[in-house]
Amino acid sequence: MIGRWRSSALEKNKVKVRRKLREPRFCFQTRSDVDVLDDGYKWRKYGQKVVKNSLHPRSYYRCTHNNCRVKKRVERLSEDCRMVITTYEGRHNHSPCDDSNSSENDGFTSF
DNA sequence: CGTGTTTGACCCGCGC
DNA sequence: GCGCGGGTCAAACACG
């Protein structure tokens, strides 16, 4: 069976994983021809799944930062292919164009 | 050579 | 208790 032995760290590391995901989710509806809107952050696609609500596949993006675990969910409307729903999950702990002047853990901790 | 993208499989929570 | 829907990860491939 040459499948996927994902049991690497899954054997006994079942603890602590899959937390509550309590981060607030910001949903934005944008009418654009492109799926991903460059808002200043870099996103890396980590999955794609088709849902019943939409006849189109949903794309899952993640911030490619070191200390940023913000997730972005891009869904397309079945009635309007040009309309995409961008759902931001979590909060960025760095500036959009992070370089030198980074806000880092400054005010986001209050959240 | 490195990073990003793509796809399939696996896991968990909820509904019936 | 079982089935289904939804979400995540990891390995391979393509492009810069």
Image (cartoon, coloured by chain):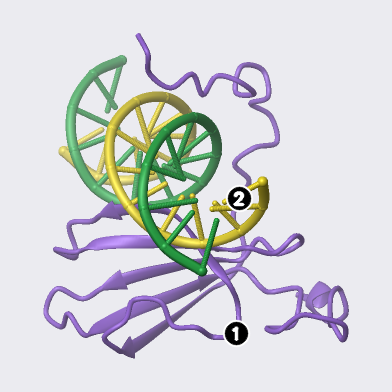
Chain colours: A purple, B yellow, C green
Mark 1 secondary-structure assignment:
loop
Instruction: Tell me the amino acid under the disc marked 2.
Output: Lys
- In which quadrant is the N terminus of chain A drawn? top left
Q: Residues within 10 Å of mark 1 (few under 14, many from 20)?
A: few
Pointer 2 chain = A
Q: Can you identify the residue that label 1 sits on?
A: A40
Q: Looking at the image, which residue sits at the far bottom?
A: A31
Q: Residue at x 54, y 68 (%)?
A: A43
- In this orientation, which residue lies closer to the viewer: C1 or A2? A2
- Is A39 drawn above or below residue B9 in the view shown? below
Instruction: Name which quarter of the figure residue A37 lies in.
Output: bottom left
- In this orientation, which residue lies closer to the viewer: A75 or B4? B4
Query: How far apart are labels 1 and 2 at the CA level?
Result: 27 Å
For marks 1 and 2, the one nearer the N-term is 2
Pointer 1 chain = A
Q: Residue at x 68, y 83 (%)?
A: A96
Q: Can you identify the residue that label 2 sits on?
A: A20
Instruction: Name which quarter of the figure residue B7 lies in.
Output: top left
- Is A66 drawn above or below residue A102 in the view shown? above
